[in-house]
Image (spheres, rainbow, N blue to C red):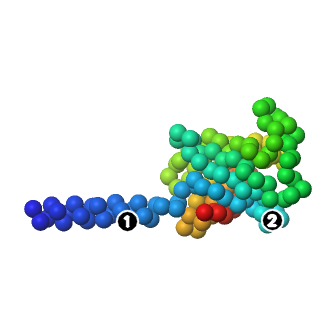
């Protein structure tokens, strides 16, 4: 009986250790985006899971000159819509340590790209890659967790 209780405690301890180690490694939360070319902070975005799909929304543009801008280059339902409040990441699903299979919209040029992302630096940063065709042909940004 002692062996069964000991084994159960070891298994529960392993479970709780895994749960604690995994905490903070989710892309869900609020992030500051950084321009990969200039290094300047661009926006605050919120990431959440809707069903099994990861989505992202632009909460605030940090450049005062861009507040109130519309996505004039966007197509479809996003055409001429405010950038702040826009869902610009969608369709990503979890695949091991990455989220992929979805799209990311660049409101600056209205183009949609395939996307993948992964949580890095112990959950403090999000590596976001937008690409055309193969992941080798694209750009990567590193966002910083705000929470």
Identify the residue shown where x is 30% and y is 65%. 13
Where on the picture, by quarter, is residue 32?
Answer: bottom right
Pointer 2 local density, CA inside 10 Å: few below 14, some 14–19, many at least 20: few
Quadrant occupied by the C terminus: bottom right
Q: Is residue 9 above or below residue 89?
A: below
- Determine the secondary structure under disc 2: loop
Q: CA distance from mark 2 to mark 1?
A: 37 Å
- 5 horizontally vs 110: left or right: left
Q: Secondary structure at mark 1?
A: helix
Residue 90 makes an appearance in the image? yes
Residue placed at 62% from the left, 50% from the top? Answer: 47
Q: Quadrant of residue 2?
A: bottom left
Quarter of the figure that contains the N terminus: bottom left
Q: Position of residue 43 (x, y in %)?
A: 76, 57
Above/below status of 77 relative to 66: above
**Residue extending furthest toward the top:** 76
Disc 2 + disc 1, Cβ < 8 Å: no
Residue labelled with disc 2: 40
Residue found farthest to the right: 65
Q: Is residue 33 above or below residue 69?
A: below
How far across and down, in percent of the image, does residue 113 sit? 73, 44
Q: Earlier in the sequence, mark 2 or mark 1?
A: 1
Q: Residue at x 69, y 47 (%)?
A: 57
Disc sitting over residue 107 in the figure: none
Q: Position of residue 4 (x, y in %)?
A: 15, 61
**Of residues 44 and 14, the one drawn nearer to the viewer in this rendering:** 44
Q: Which residue, given by chain and number where applicable, does mark 1 sit on?
A: 17
């Amino acid at each position: 009986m002692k062996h069964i209780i000991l084994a159960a405690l070891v298994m529960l301890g392993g479970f709780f250790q895994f749960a604690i180690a995994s905490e903070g490694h989710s892309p869900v939360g609020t992030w500051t985006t950084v321009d990969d070319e200039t290094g300047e902070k661009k926006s605050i975005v919120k990431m959440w899971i809707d069903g099994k799909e990861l989505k992202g929304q632009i909460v605030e543009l940090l450049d005062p000159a861009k507040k109130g801008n519309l996505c004039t280059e966007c197509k479809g339902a996003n055409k001429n819509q405010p950038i702040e409040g826009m869902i610009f990441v969608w369709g990503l699903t979890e695949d091991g340590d990455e989220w992929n299979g979805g799209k990311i919209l660049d409101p600056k040029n209205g183009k949609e790209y395939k996307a993948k992302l992964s949580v890095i630096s112990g959950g403090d940063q999000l590596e976001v890659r937008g690409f055309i065709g193969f992941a080798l042909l694209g750009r990567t940004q590193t966002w910083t967790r705000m929470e």
